[in-house]
Image: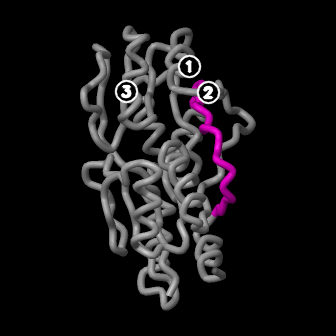
Amino acid sequence: MLKALILGGTTEATALARRLAGHPRVDARVSLAGRTKNPVLPPLPTRIGGFGGVDGLAGYLRSEGIAAVIDATHPFAARISANAAAACAQAGMALRLLTRPAWTAGPGDRWIGVPDMAAAALAVRDLGDGVFLTVGRQEVAAFEVVPDKRYLIRAVDPPDPMPALPRATLILDRGPFTVAGELALMRRHGVEVVVSKNSGGRATDAKLEAARELGLPVVMVERPAGNGVPELHDVDAAVAWLEGL
């Protein structure tokens, strides 16, 4: 029986956990960072919380007899991905990155690519007044440098603390979202520019189609650089890799 660890927190991680539940040859468990207050728990043994850095993760892998790790964290979870790469190298564990392909701009899109959230905040300075922040709750404070905009913030959990944005409206919601729903939301709140991370996937891409239909600019924060870990782009490939070990 192959012991495997899934570093989770994404829809892909949950789908992989469902596929591996009761698997005859793969004994998998899931680790969640614990940043979401009420996470969707996968149907596998699950631990919540950090490992204590590279050494802590490497020690966990050894003590639990883990033979393979699949990093299915969010594409912007750069720290845990870097720790996983270093820990697996240290402990001699097989590692693959299960990641959704990045979004790419198409005809009619008005994307403004930026390298990080600080650059995204500067980019909205010269754009419309109504700014739709779809970047999660942890980095909205970056937009305090442009406090005069009218912000619509959507997140699963509320920012803590709330950023000093006097004209902000907070919506708590979890994808997947529909194009019709996103169009209605943007029209209702007078959205003039959308800010997004290039997360990829289908759960939240409806906002991009809605922005295209409305002719709105999208400030797109590009993904951080990877760690050279081989990638898998769907659950079938992840299962096949584990079964082949």
Which type of secondary structure does the marked residue at label 1 adopt? helix
Q: Which of marks 2 and 3 is in front?
A: 2
Residue denoted by label 3: 152
Q: Which residue is drawn at 39% across and 62% down?
A: 31
Disc 2 vs disc 1: Cβ atoms closer than 8 Å? yes
Q: Residue at x 40, y 73 (%)?
A: 64
Q: Which residue is drawn at 32% across and 16% down?
A: 165
Which type of secondary structure does the marked residue at label 2 adopt? loop
Along the viewing direction, whichever of 144 and 190 lies nearer the viewer: 144
**Residue 6 x/y as whole percent:** 47, 66
Residue denoted by label 2: 115
Q: Name the quadrant containing residue 161.
A: top left
- Count all numbered tags in the image, as a single digit: 3
Give the main secondary structure, helix, strand or loop, of the magenta stretch.
loop
Q: Which of marks 1 and 3 is in front?
A: 1
- Disc 2 versus disc 3: distance between alpha carbons? 22 Å
Q: How crowded is the residue under tag 2: few (<14 C-alpha within 10 Å), some, or many (20+)?
A: few
- Disc 2 versus disc 1: distance between alpha carbons? 7 Å
**Residue 121 x/y as whole percent:** 50, 18
Residue denoted by label 1: 119
Along the viewing direction, whichever of 175 and 54 lies nearer the viewer: 54
Q: Is residue 154 left or right of residue 72?
A: left
Q: Which of marks 1 and 3 is nearer the N terminus?
A: 1
Q: Is residue 235 left or right of residue 184?
A: right
Q: Which amino acid does label 3 sit on?
A: Leu
Magenta range: 214-233
Along the viewing direction, whichever of 64 and 189 lies nearer the viewer: 64
Q: Which of marks 2 and 3 is nearer the N terminus?
A: 2
162 w.r.t. 181: above or below: above
Residue 227 within the segment the image draws in magenta = yes
Which type of secondary structure does the marked residue at label 3 adopt? strand
Q: What residue type is labelled 1?
A: Ala
